[in-house]
Image: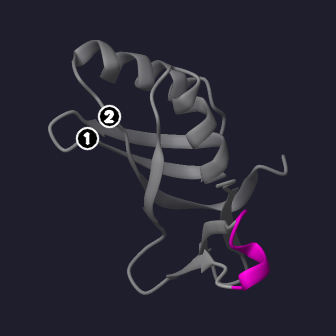
């Protein structure tokens, strides 16, 4: 099994700036090329993309970003199966170059989790 997939399907939702049906078609075509996605729903009005599959959220984000659109994961898993941690340093030595990020931990089955980690370092 590829390292960007798990053995159990789960849902994930992404915020994506969509302006028209062309945007929807472009994102849909990009998602169709990914292995491990069983279904997806692109909601133009609410600017969201919901994906059901076993592919890593980072691969879905990259695929959407390759269309020229941004994508931010909004949620994953099922109710009561996920945890979120906001990463931020308040150490004085990090003041000029703070590290910030987000970690999501999603239980996709009894024996498997998906860890999505986004870390950014800013220089002031």
Q: Residues within 10 Å of mark 2 (few under 14, many from 20)?
A: some
Q: Residues within 10 Å of mark 1 (few under 14, many from 20)?
A: some
User: Which quadrant holds the C terminus?
Assistant: bottom right
From which residue to which does the magenta span run? 91-97
Tag 2 residue: 17
Q: Check whether the beta carbons of the residues at disc 2 and disc 1 lie within 8 A of each other.
A: yes
Locate residue 51 relative to residue 58 in the image: left or right: left
Q: Is residue 1 magenta?
A: no
Image colouring: one colour
In the displayed structure, 115 sits above or below 7; it is: below
Query: Is residue 93 or residue 114 the one in the foreground?
Result: 93
In the displayed structure, 66 sits above or below 111; it is: above
Q: How many tags in the picture?
A: 2
Q: Residue 47's mark?
A: 1
Instruction: Give the residue displayed 64% in from the left and 84% down from the top.
Output: 90
Q: Earlier in the sequence, mark 2 or mark 1?
A: 2
CA distance separating discs 2 and 1 = 6 Å
- Say which element carries label 2: loop
- Say which element carries label 1: loop
């Amino acid at each position: 099994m590829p390292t960007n997939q798990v053995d159990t399907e789960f849902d994930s939702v992404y915020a994506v700036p969509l302006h028209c049906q062309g945007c929807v078609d472009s994102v849909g075509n990009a998602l169709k090329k990914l292995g491990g996605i069983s279904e997806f729903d692109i909601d133009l009005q609410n600017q969201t993309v919901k994906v059901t599959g076993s592919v890593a959220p980072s691969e879905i984000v990259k695929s959407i970003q390759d269309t020229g659109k941004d994508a931010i994961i909004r949620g994953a898993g099922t109710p009561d199966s996920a945890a979120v941690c906001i990463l931020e340093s308040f150490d004085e030595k990090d003041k000029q170059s703070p590290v910030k990020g987000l970690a999501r931990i999603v239980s996709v089955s009894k024996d498997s989790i998906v860890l999505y980690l986004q870390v950014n370092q800013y220089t002031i």
